[in-house]
Structure formats: C-alpha cells, structure tokens
Image: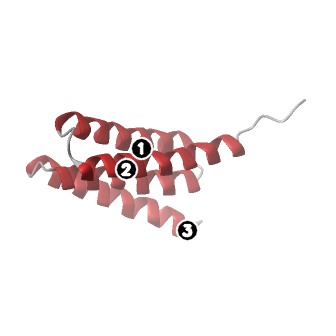
C-alpha cells in the first residue's frame, strides 16, 4: 500500500510538471504527454481505492485529447494517441465496474 501511495504522489507531481510545460509551451506532443500524465495518475488513484478521483483523472486526460483533436484534426499523432488512450481508459472503466458490481441481496 505504501508504494501505491508514493506512486500517487509521484504521479501528481508529474502531472503538475506536464501541465506547466503544456501551458507555457503549447504543442501537440505536450498535450499528448499531459493526457497520459492524467492516465498514469488515474491508474494509481484507482489502485489506491480512490476510484472517483481516478475516473475524474481519466476523463480529464480524454478531454485534453479531445481538445487537441479539435485543434489539430489532421494530426496522426493525436489520432493515434486518442485511440490508444481511449482503449486504455476503457480497460480501467471496465475494471472499476467489475469491482463495484452490486451483489444481490
């Protein structure tokens, strides 16, 4: 459990750094990196039983990519990142749903 808590802290710091870089140097690659930073934070939040926060972080990463696609609709890098991110995001949502299935009374 301690390692997961440390991983959450590390990912939160990394997300802050990526957000700062993306804000001060807007580019497709930084926006993609920011989205994946949200993903990795979400992964460790979910592993740390912080499910709501994890799902929110997954959604924030997807929103960042959607915004990037709107700004750069012809970018193959963005389209590829969006496809990969969506696939990985869906895996975590399926996982969360599987552990939160209500048992019959």
| Quarter of the image that includes the N terminus | bottom right
The answer to whether 73 appears left or right of 45 in the picture is: left
Q: Position of residue 74 (x, y in %)?
A: 20, 42
Please state which of the two labelled residues, at mark 3 or mark 2, is closer to the viewer.
2
- Cα distance, mark 2 to mark 1? 5 Å
Is there any visible trace of residue 50 in the rendered image? no
- Taking depth in this image into account, of 50 and 79 the one nearest to the observer is 79
User: Which residue is outermost to the left?
Assistant: 24
**Residue occupied by mark 1:** 57
> Mark 3 falls on what kind of element?
helix
- Check the image and name the residue furthest to the right: 105
Where's residue 21, x and y in %? Answer: 15, 55
Q: Residue furthest top?
A: 105
Q: Sequence-wise, which precedes: disc 2 or disc 1?
A: 2
Residue at image location 50% in from the left, 57% down from the top = 44
Residue pointed to by mark 3? 2
Residue 56 x/y as whole percent: 44, 38
Report which quarter residue 7 is drawn in: bottom left
State yes or no: discs 2 and 1 in contact (Cβ < 8 Å). yes
Q: Does 21 sit left or right of 88 as displayed?
A: left
Q: Quadrant of residue 70?
A: top left
Pick the residue in front: 103 or 91: 91
**Nearest the camera: 90 or 49?**
90
**Residue indicated by mark 2:** 38
Per the image, label 1 sits on a secondary structure element best described as helix
Distance of label 3 from label 1 (alpha carbons): 21 Å
Quarter of the image holding residue 103?
top right
Q: Nearer the viewer, mark 3 or mark 1?
A: 1
CA gap, disc 3 to disc 2? 21 Å
Label 2 crowd (10 A; few <14 / some 14-19 / many >=20): many
């Amino acid at each position: 459990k301690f390692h997961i808590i440390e991983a959450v802290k590390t990912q939160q710091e990394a997300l802050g750094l990526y957000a700062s870089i993306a804000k001060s140097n807007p580019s497709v690659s930084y926006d993609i990196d920011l989205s994946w930073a949200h993903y990795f934070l979400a992964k460790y939040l979910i592993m740390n039983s912080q499910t709501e926060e994890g799902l929110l972080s997954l959604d924030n990463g997807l929103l960042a990519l959607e915004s990037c696609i709107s700004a750069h609709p012809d970018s193959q890098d963005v389209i590829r990142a969006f496809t990969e991110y969506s696939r990985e995001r869906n895996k975590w949502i399926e996982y969360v749903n599987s552990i939160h299935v209500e048992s019959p009374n």
